[in-house]
Image (tube, rainbow, N blue to C red):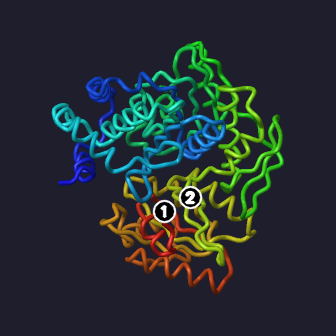
């Protein structure tokens, strides 16, 4: 078994909430997390985009920057980067060779092991900053072993209800677990009750509470999203009002680290941010996009963005994992699409098309819906519909279809 296969085999151990195994493994690795200047980012939606923008701006300021995100789209190596370059297979192999006995001895899970790998790699590369995206929740997430320089919580919405709780306050309590004593907390746009709760937790920890800078004059085009802040006007290549908000959170984080940073550096950092699978344009000739949105808040943002650019409803290829909240997703999609093609495959860890079709119908989503068992056929059907109608098309719902999407469009 090669080292990456071994790493993926650890998924059999499932998800364990708690920090004991992570701390044990990190101790055996020499406690690399204690050598890092960490920006720790939690939230339901936008935490990956925000992390990527923070990392890009810090890099443009002249820092060596590690970025740890999950999940990956195509290759595991995408999860761990330094200055935008993915960790090599040789580095992964070296880590597994050194610590396999320890990993097996303590039954370290996939994510616990991956987190230890990331921290060890960043310490080895002597990064100036490590931008760390929470995997799930916050309080008991494996990444929550760090003593960060700044924390950020992006918008909180319903997701992973089986693990984090079935209401916003329960989920917010888990996210708030990353708040540390005397450490600045940047808070993205939240419902008023959630903002009030986070503010109280910050107060209890003597943590400076900083709301994300307000944005105005948001203009969305197929080339990016322009917006104003109290510091001036910015443009992000990422599409949508929500990405303007994420960018404002990233800028607020950066300003908490260095108030004197040049605005031109921030803009160049935004320009160079690469974050695939977030309303990613797939074709120069056709209005075709790929979006990993898989909860109702993410779908709302996607629909709003597509309508603002094209003033038309999208054709959609929809695939989902079986643990997603189908009822809320159905409600978000209702009356917001031209036609939906459902697809999926257990081989891709997705619901089968028939099962998804039935689940949507159960919640009243049954008009202008067809099914394609093969995701490749579904993508081909979408391309044909977009060509003939000249309306936008979006492949959405999961990271797990990324390879099929990128292969279809020749994207490396």
Percent x, y of residue 130: 50, 33
Choose the circle earlier in sequence order: 1 or 2.
2
> Is 392 on the left or on the right of 164, as rendered?
right
**Quarter location, residue 282:** bottom right
Residue in the image at 55% along x and 65% along y = 290
Percent x, y of residue 198: 59, 25
Residue in the image at 45% along x and 53% along y = 325
Numbered label attached to residue 111: none
Q: Secondary structure at mark 1?
A: loop
Q: Secondary structure at mark 2?
A: helix
> Is 367 on the left or on the right of 142, as rendered?
right
Percent x, y of residue 160: 43, 44
Please say if the residues under marks 1 and 2 sit with CB atoms less than 8 Å apart.
Answer: yes
Q: Name above or below for residue 234 compared with residue 395.
A: above
Using the image as rendered, state which of residue 108 and residue 54 is in the foreground. Answer: 54
Numbered label attached to residue 363: 1
> Is 184 on the left or on the right of 344, as rendered?
right
Percent x, y of residue 167: 50, 38
Numbered label attached to residue 331: 2
């Amino acid at each position: 078994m090669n080292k990456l296969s071994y790493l993926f085999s650890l998924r059999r151990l499932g998800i364990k909430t708690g920090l004991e195994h992570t701390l044990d493994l990190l101790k055996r690795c020499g406690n690399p997390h204690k050598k890092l200047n960490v920006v720790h980012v939690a939230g339901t939606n936008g935490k990956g985009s925000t992390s990527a923008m923070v990392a890009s701006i810090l890099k443009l300021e002249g820092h060596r920057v590690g970025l740890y995100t999950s999940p990956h789209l195509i290759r595991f190596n995408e999860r761990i980067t330094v200055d935008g370059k993915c960790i090599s297979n040789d580095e992964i192999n070296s880590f597994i060779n050194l610590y396999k006995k320890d990993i097996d001895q303590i039954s370290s899970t996939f994510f616990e092991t991956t987190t230890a790998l990331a921290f060890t790699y960043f310490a080895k590369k002597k990064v100036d900053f490590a931008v760390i995206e929470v995997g799930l929740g916050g309080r008991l997430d494996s990444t929550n072993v760090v003593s960060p320089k700044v924390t950020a919580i992006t918008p909180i919405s319903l997701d992973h209800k089986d693990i984090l709780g079935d209401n916003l306050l329960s989920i917010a309590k888990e996210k708030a677990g990353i708040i540390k004593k005397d450490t600045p907390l940047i808070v993205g746009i939240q419902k008023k009750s959630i903002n009030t709760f986070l503010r109280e937790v910050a107060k209890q920890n003597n943590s400076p509470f900083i709301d994300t800078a307000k944005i105005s004059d948001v203009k969305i085009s197929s080339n990016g999203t322009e917006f104003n802040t109290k510091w001036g006007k910015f443009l992000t290549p990422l599409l949508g009002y929500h990405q303007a908000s994420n960018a404002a959170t990233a800028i607020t984080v950066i300003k908490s680290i260095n108030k004197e940073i040049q605005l031109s550096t921030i803009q160049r950092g935004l320009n160079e941010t690469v974050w695939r699978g977030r309303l990613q344009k797939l074709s120069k000739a056709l209005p075709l996009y790929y979006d990993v949105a898989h909860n109702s808040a993410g779908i709302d943002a996607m629909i709003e963005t597509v309508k603002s650019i094209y003033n038309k409803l999208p054709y959609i290829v929809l695939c989902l994992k079986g643990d997603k909240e189908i009822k809320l997703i159905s409600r978000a999609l209702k009356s917001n699409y031209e036609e939906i093609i459902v697809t999926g495959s257990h081989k891709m860890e997705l619901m089968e098309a028939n099962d998804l079709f039935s689940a949507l119908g159960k919640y009243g989503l049954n008009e202008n819906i067809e099914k394609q068992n093969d995701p490749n056929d579904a993508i081909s059907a979408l391309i044909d519909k977009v060509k003939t109608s000249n309306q936008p098309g979006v492949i959405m719902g999961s990271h797990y279809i990324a390879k099929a999407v990128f292969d279809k469009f020749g994207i490396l």
